[in-house]
Image (cartoon, rainbow, N blue to C red):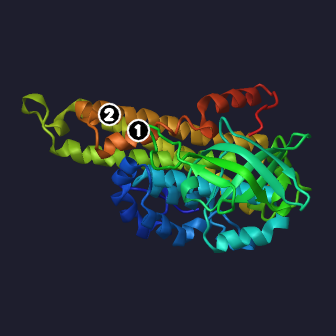
Amino acid sequence: MSFTSNSDAEGLTPRSPAYVGPLLSDIGKQAASADASRSIDSALIASIKKNDVMRLSASPEISGLDETFVNIGSELQAVAGQCTSTAWCLWNHLCTFHHFAGLLGKQNTDLLSDVVSKHEWVCFPAGAESKVSGWQTDSGNFELNGVASFGSGSRYADWAGVVFKEGASQKPMFAFANLRSPGIEIEKTWQAMSLRASATDHIHYTNAHVPSKSVVHLPYKYREHLRNPSTEMIHHRYREDWVAISVMWLGAMATGLVEAAFHEAIESIRHRVAIVGTKMSDKPTIHINLGKVRALLNAASDTVYSALDETDNRSAMKIIPTENDYFRQCASGMQAVQFCDEALKIILRTLGGNGLREGTNFERRYRDFQAMPLHINGHVDRITEQLGRLSLGMKTQNPF
């Protein structure tokens, strides 16, 4: 894997984004308006769907580009530095598609290949308050009813993963639903402080039908099922758990967001005069604070990209991951976000009262960042508890 260490004392970073580069200017230009309107520009969404970034987490067997986990992280990192809402939706698509490909398996190769070749978008509403039930009809299809929440990117998506309980048996099942089908409605519920344009909305299913072929049993600890050598996979990369991958990519996005805030703060400090006419750039405490931020960002980048690189190497050698590998990945992304959280607070302290002004890039970035340490996949309480159990030689408990 190719990494670089930049001349201004930055930590390890992957190569420049090879796919989203031409889109970055447009992504940045619409960030403020997307935040205000709570919706990403429709023309930009169309441009993203035409870009090969949509195919990065798909393997060649299903028309994908089989890109490395490191390089996908670099794409998301770059987007997050421009508009975190856009990055969040793209992140959700790439990591949940990885999950869907592992669950749906070889029996759905044709369907997945069609989705990938058309650059179609997927989402996975399955958060708190989700409750969907389903049963197989006389025609053989499954009928779904209920609501699924926290569907980031759902407003821009074409397909959704659906976790539901089957009929009287209440067995956990997974379905891949076409959002353009009758009986499926997206409700705009994400009225939040952070990531206002991420469309983390509810999806309602009312007598919605899904072909039985794209419905599979959902094992309680599905990562153990995917690690089982006897489980047939479309590609070895899908043995890596999507939650762990999502947390590492979340860490990469956090570094992109805070790097952008850091560089903008530096430009502001260079031209600002403090009370009594002292240049901010001449104050020793400013130097100390900026040095702390730089060190924290280096640690965040080095931590998460090392784990991403390990994942690529393991995948290339077709080594099946273990529970220790899973929590190594989760912990690296979580810790990168924690480092970035501390760095962002130091930037705010350094900016002083100006950092509290509404309508600035910093204010938007600061709000958007608040969602990162709170996401359940990378939540510090979830990960450290289970990592502590592993450290004591005890079995982990969480299904995801």
Up/down of 172 relative to 349, above or below: below
| Left or right placement of residue 396 versus residue 29 in this view | right
Alpha-carbon neighbours of circle 1 within 10 Å: few (<14), some, or many (≥20)? some
Instruction: Answer few, some or many: residues within 10 Å of disc 2's Cα (few below 14, many 20 plus, some between 14 and 19).
Output: some
Mark 1 vs mark 2, foreground winner is 1
Say whether residue 108 is visible.
yes
Residue at the image point whose x is 51% and y is 34% from the top: 338
Q: Quadrant of residue 219?
A: top right
Q: Choose between 136 and 196: the one closer to the eye.
A: 136
Q: Which mark is residue 221?
A: none
Residue at image coords 28%, 44%: 360
Alpha carbon distance from label 1 to label 2: 12 Å
Q: Which residue is label 2 attached to?
A: 348
- Labels 1 and 2 touching (C-beta < 8 A): no
User: Which residue occupies 61% across, 58% down?
Assistant: 94
Look at label 2 and name its amino acid.
Leu
**399 sits to left or right of 273:** right
In terms of secondary structure, where does tag 1 sit? helix
Q: Tell me the SS state at disc 2.
A: helix
Horizontal relation, residue 33 to residue 300: left or right: left
* Amino acid of disc 1: Arg
Q: Residue at x 92, y 40 (%)?
A: 169
Give the position of the N terminus as an image quadrant. Answer: bottom right
Quarter of the figure that contains the C terminus: top right
The image quadrant of residue 54 is: bottom right
Residue 316 locus on image (x, y percent): 72, 62
Residue 296 image position (x, y, % from top left): 44, 38
Asked whether, in this view, residue 98 is left or right of residue 136, the answer is: left
What residue would you read off at disc 1? 367
Q: Position of residue 70 (x, y in %)?
A: 58, 57
